[in-house]
Amino acid sequence: MFESLLWLEEITSTQDFLKEKPLRIYSVVVANKQKKGRGRFGREWYSQEGGLYLSFSLPKNLRDETTLPLVLSNAVANYVRSLGFLPAIKWVNDVYIHGKKLCGILTERLKDKIVVGIGINLNQESFPEHLQAVSLKMVSGRHFDKVDFLIKLLDYVEESLRKLSEEGFLSFKDEIESRLLFKNSEVILYTPEPVVGILQGIDKDGSLLLLTQDGLKAFQIGEITLRAV
Ligand code: ATP
Ligand code: BTN
């Protein structure tokens, strides 16, 4: 599926690079460091040496805004699971291990393509306390070869995207729900107004289901922040 790979030592952001340059669909861009890595809503993505920072483009089609980040988080989780870790998915675009954030995924729609960015903490030794971030090395003591990790990760991504287009999101729903962070726990959703409820799972379109004082409510992707109570 993926056509070409450009691996740079340092760049502002692989995401911005791929958005600005007229590279073909299915191109992959990787950087060892980013000067201005970013998350959703322009939040900073801490991109020191040791992490894997990549972006790739996909054709613009009917892939749903909520299901794509969930399916990609699940692909990362499947690969991380195959390495012997127990990952959780924090709706809608993050992978956690040991209660901390391991990976963030950004999906952005342009006129002619979708640009996906994935940041995964592999070999960092520590993070600023406020980030609540963790790397695979910090929990295992192991060093991960970035090239090997990238190639295998892209296989998982490719397989998931094929399954999404052939079988639809429903075929992922149970697996994603089974590893959903905060499932059956009380959470606050900042929508941005705070809504408190018990996280029940996800709906067939990927929206988050919350049992609130006013009954069961579904929340679509948007500027929503999810926190444990
Ligand atoms: P969150 O609930 O963690 O804020 P979010 O998906 O709503 O997640 P995003 O904008 O998607 O927020 O992610 C960016 C956030 O991720 C930053 O605000 C920061 O807290 C955290 N972060 C930044 N760099 C890293 C990193 N390398 N590893 C883990 N977490 C990071
Ligand atoms: C998030 O959790 O909000 C998503 C973080 C996405 C970070 C990746 S790292 C590669 C790509 N380049 C960026 O500037 N951001 C994404």
Image: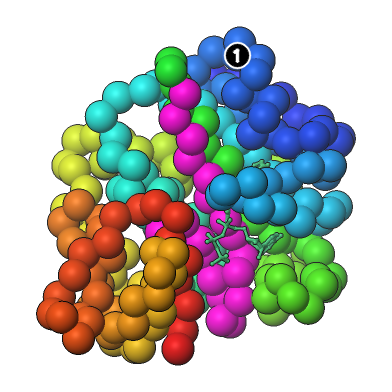
Q: Is residue 159 left or right of residue 202?
A: right
The number of numbered badges drawn on the structure is 1
Q: What percent of the width, then of the height, locates residue 165?
A: 24, 34
Q: Which residue is mark 1?
A: 23
Q: Specify whether residue 186 is in view.
A: yes
Dot 1 amino acid type: Leu
Magenta region, mostly helix, strand or loop? strand
Q: Quadrant of the C terminus?
A: bottom left
Q: Specify whether residue 152 is in view.
A: no
The span picked out in magenta is 91-110
Image position of 114 with respect to 107: above or below: above
Q: What percent of the width, then of the height, locates residue 184?
A: 29, 86
Seen at 56% across and 81% down, the residue is 99
Seen at 86% across and 35% down, the residue is 9
Q: Residue furthest left?
A: 215
Q: Residue furthest front?
A: 193
Front in this rendered view, residue 105 or 110: 110
Q: What percent of the width, then of the height, locates residue 197?
A: 29, 83
